[in-house]
Image (cartoon, coloured by chain):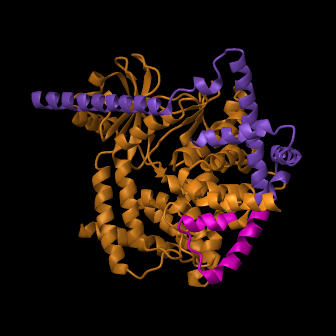
Chain colours: A orange, B purple
């Protein structure tokens, strides 16, 4: 363990020393300096392997905690590692099932489809029909993908977390972000990555997603083959289509990208505002456009959860953006744990008003990312702590906007959100607790009108 | 309960359709929606909500007409969400059983090796 500790220290120092010229030996302007250190740390994380790559991905969704340069650099982190030989993956499958892949599937492709820090994906075909939790039965011979946790990945990640925790506790006072508590961040990371290491969690969420969207034939997700899945192996339906990075090919094939952009965005909002559980790792590689004009959500490794109360408060914040209402945004952000001290309320309110007014692009559409990330930055500038999860959600909504605009550049995601937020808040009027709270005021207002 | 609130307002709007000019104006503003129609803070939100209730009112009107013709109306065709949830819970349980069965088979295979 001690040797791993020295490897981590050596790699980080090596990268930081190599970045000294780019940082002007500490004399360059602050932005350039921060960018150079961020780049060095990103390279160190990539060199240090799975645990650090995943940690970088977590940092990339916390613009509330880290500097812009650090977040941007971690976003460009490459989670594409050289593929392991098929034999290593076949050994994991054999250890999990006590049988070779050929005994479990009609065919198994030794050539990997993708390889990332935690898992490697191979194609296979089903040997017998399988009735999934939701949706039609997958017939024998159906194409599936088999996602397998890389041998040693779990142990190496857990070991690195222990070492990193020890190092961070020792370093203690080092500031790597604006107000970040590195040990708390590492603990949060440990919880997230543990969930990701048990692939069944991802499978269960995919099932739930299919159920939630059972009335929407335009939104799909892979069906899970539970008879061929364990904690380390997840077998699911193979989705045909184009990644969003390949959108021109989809357009050439006649896919209606505008309809899909609107649908993809509303599907995400439905997850957040209606169900309170959402795909928190959306990027162009995790979304497919299929030839029959549907949008497929893939890879449910990171999922965000909201309580009904949080969901309602977030809907209120979104309604504030839709209807440009800074007071509503502040009131409900406070309920979400964004605690603005009394002496900061006025400047924050003014900044928020400016953000709300400045979210319109030249083409007349509203820019959610500008608002959302600007709001997080505004709170950071005023030293206001942002609760865990709030940053992740805003970043996810900003990503959805980016993804929808990749499909159709003229889409206005704020306008798309209007019916959702309005309807949900309209329905919330019937909530007994709310009625109990607000009815006396409503009756008094009505009486005032009647006697006026 | 929650949907009923929208229906309640829709019913109120239906019975006051000819009378309330102020509400009609609010619905119109809410329907216009776009960037221009969304700049008025809390009032714009109420307009948006009025437009949505007006939409619900149209559904209610269609349902009432259908019922008068003796047809089944849209709200009655909706399956019970609680029942749907139970269906999913049972299906999820079946998935877990499949998974446990596969694990037991693996165990048997490993013990046999």
Q: Is residue A169 left or right of residue B102?
A: right
- Give the residue displayed 48% in from the left and 52% down from the top: A304
Please identify the quarter of the rendering in which residue A322 is found.
bottom right
Residue B111 is at least partly visible in this image: yes
Residue A396 in percent (x, y) is at 58, 53
Give the side of residue A364 with respect to residue A241, left or right.
right
| Up-down relation of residue A352 to residue B62 (above or below) | below
| In the image: residue A433, left or right of residue A84 | right
Residue B53, x across and y down, in percent: 73, 41
Quadrant containing the N terminus of chain A is: bottom left
Where A162 falls versus A315 (above or below)?
below
| In magenta segment, residue A335 | yes
Q: Residue at coordinates 70% horizontally, 35% vertically from top-left?
A: A248
Q: Which quadrant, please, contains the C terminus of chain A?
A: bottom right
- Please identify the residue farthest to the left as the structure is shown: B112
Residue B6, position as x, y percentages in the image: 67, 41
| A440, above or below B87, in the image | below
Question: Residue at left 36%, top 72%?
Answer: A9
From this viewpoint, is residue A29 visible? no
- B84 or A318: which is nearer to us? B84
Residue A392 in the magenta stretch? The answer is: no
Q: Main secondary structure of the magenta part?
A: helix
- Looking at the rendered structure, the number of numbered marks drawn on it comes to 0
Say which residue appears at 55% left-offset and 42% top-offset.
A285
Q: Is residue A225 above or below residue A52?
A: above
Q: Quadrant of residue A148?
A: top left
Range shown magenta: A328-357
- Residue B57: x and y in percent read 74, 35
């Amino acid at each position: 363990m001690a040797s791993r500790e020295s490897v981590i220290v050596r790699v980080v120092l090596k990268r930081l020393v190599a970045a000294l010229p780019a940082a002007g030996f500490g004399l360059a302007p602050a932005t350039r300096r921060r960018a150079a250190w961020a780049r060095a740390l990103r390279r160190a994380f990539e060199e240090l392997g799975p645990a650090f790559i995943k940690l970088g991905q977590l940092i990339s969704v916390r613009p509330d905690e880290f500097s812009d340069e650090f977040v941007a650099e971690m976003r460009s982190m490459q989670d594409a590692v050289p593929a392991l030989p098929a034999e290593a993956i076949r050994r994991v499958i054999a250890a999990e099932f006590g049988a070779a892949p050929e005994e479990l599937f009609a065919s198994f492709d030794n050539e990997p489809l993708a390889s990332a820090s935690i898992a490697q994906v191979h194609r296979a075909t089903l040997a017998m029909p399988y009735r999934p939790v939701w949706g039609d039965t997958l017939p024998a011979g159906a194409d599936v993908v088999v996602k397998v946790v890389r041998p040693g990945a779990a142990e190496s990640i857990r070991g690195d977390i222990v070492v990193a925790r020890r190092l961070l506790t020792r370093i203690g006072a080092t500031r790597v972000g604006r107000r970040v508590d590195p040990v708390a961040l590492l603990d949060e990371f440990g919880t997230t990555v543990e969930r990701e290491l048990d692939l069944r969690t991802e499978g269960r969420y995919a099932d739930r997603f299919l159920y939630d969207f059972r009335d929407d034939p335009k939104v799909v997700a892979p069906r899970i083959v539970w008879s061929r899945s364990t904690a380390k192996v997840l077998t699911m339906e193979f989705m045909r289509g184009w990644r969003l990075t390949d959108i021109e090919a989809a357009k050439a094939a006649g896919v209606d990208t505008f309809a899909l952009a609107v649908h993809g965005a509303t599907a995400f909002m439905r997850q957040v505002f209606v169900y309170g559980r959402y795909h928190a790792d959306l990027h162009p590689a995790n979304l497919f456009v299929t030839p029959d004009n549907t949008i497929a959500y893939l890879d449910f490794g990171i999922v965000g959860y909201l309580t009904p109360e949080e969901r309602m408060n977030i809907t209120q914040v979104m309604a504030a953006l839709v209807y440009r209402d800074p007071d509503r945004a502040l009131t409900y952000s406070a309920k979400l744990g964004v605690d603005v001290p009394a002496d900061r309320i006025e400047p924050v309110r003014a900044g928020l008003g400016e953000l709300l007014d400045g979210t319109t692009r030249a083409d007349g559409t509203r820019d959610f990312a500008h608002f959302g990330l600007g709001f997080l930055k505004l709170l950071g500038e005023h030293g206001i702590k942002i609760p865990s999860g709030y940053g992740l959600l805003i970043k996810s909504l900003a990503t959805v906007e980016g993804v929808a605009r990749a499909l159709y550049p003229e889409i206005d995601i704020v306008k798309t959100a209007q019916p959702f937020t309005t309807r949900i808040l309209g329905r919330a009027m019937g909530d007994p607790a709310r009625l109990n709270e607000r009815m006396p005021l409503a009756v008094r207002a009505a009486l005032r009108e009647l006697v006026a | 309960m929650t949907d009923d609130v929208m229906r309640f307002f829709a019913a109120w709007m239906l019975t006051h359709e000819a009378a309330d000019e102020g509400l009609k104006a609010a619905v119109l503003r809410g329907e216009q929606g776009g960037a221009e129609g969304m700049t008025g803070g809390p009032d714009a939100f109420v307009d948006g909500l009025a437009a949505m209730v007006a939409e619900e009112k149209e559904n209610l009107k269609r349902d009432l007409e259908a019922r008068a013709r003796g047809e089944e109306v849209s709200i009655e065709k909706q399956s019970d969400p609680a029942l749907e949830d139970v269906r999913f819970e049972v299906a999820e349980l079946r998935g877990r059983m499949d998974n446990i069965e596969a694990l037991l088979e693996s165990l048997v295979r490993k013990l046999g090796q």
